[in-house]
Image: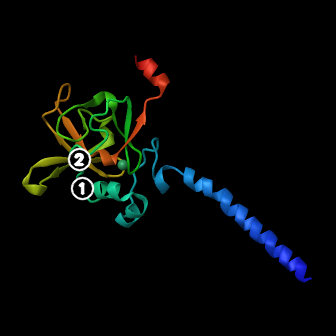
Amino acid sequence: MKRSIVFLLLAFLLQSCSYSQSSKPKKMESTNKNNPVYSNTDSSQVNLSEDEWKKILPEDVYNIARMKGTERPWSSKFEGSKEKGTYYCAACGNPLFISDTKFESGCGWPSFYQPISKSSIIYAPDHTHGMSRTEVMCGRCKAHLGHVFDDGPPPTGLRYCINGVILDFKKAKEAEEKYNR
Ligand SMILES: [Zn+2]
């Protein structure tokens, strides 16, 4: 009698052990850093509380996206990058810019002259720090991205000065590159 109880217990332990092992890789794979709203294709608006954002965003992304912080100039690996691909919002995955519209502004932050579409960005007047600037935010989740200035190159004459921390870059697929050549 006792033996069968021990056996049952052992069987149970083994089962729970294998269960936890098999569930581990699933967690690792789950889309961007445990972020349930992250999607490169879903364009529906994201409205989360600041507490919820704090839970799902890495600290550096949270500080820019929600606290409207600014990363140190020249600190982003994207600043001088010329790789072909798409830049997405690091908070929600919304497509923001394509590499074709990126240019070297010399300002120390990744710069673009045009967003992917009109709805990918929203604008707001910003009078903080004694300046009069236009803030740009993600059109899907309202994450702070940076500012837009009117000293950019043609064809728009605009310079979208964006914090690299809030950008997720994905390389263009080879097939797309060939097609665009
Ligand atoms: Zn976003």
CA neighbours of label 1 inside 10 A, class few (<14), some (14 to 19), many (20+): some
For badge 2, the amino acid type reads Gly
Q: As displayed, is residue 55 above or below residue 9?
A: above
Residue 34 visible to the viewer: yes
Callout 1: helix, strand or loop?
A: loop
The residue furthest left is 130
Residue 161: percent from left, percent from top? 21, 41
> Which label belongs to residue 146?
2
Q: Relative to the observer, which residue lies in front, 165 or 92?
A: 165
| Location of residue 77 in the rendering, given as x and y in whole percent from the top left corner | 31, 41
Q: Which quarter of the figure is the N terminus placed in?
A: bottom right
Picture quarter with the C terminus: top left
**Quadrant housing residue 118:** top left
* Residue 166 on image: x %, y %: 33, 48
| Three-letter amino acid code of the residue under disc 1 | Gly
Residue at the outermost bottom position: 2
Residue designated by label 1: 69
- The Cα–Cα distance between marks 2 and 1, rounded to whole angstroms, is 9 Å
**Dot 2: what SS?**
strand
Of 124 and 144, the residue lying toward us? 144
Which residue: 43% across, 22% down? 177
Q: Tell me where residue 121 appears, x and y as whole percent.
A: 29, 43
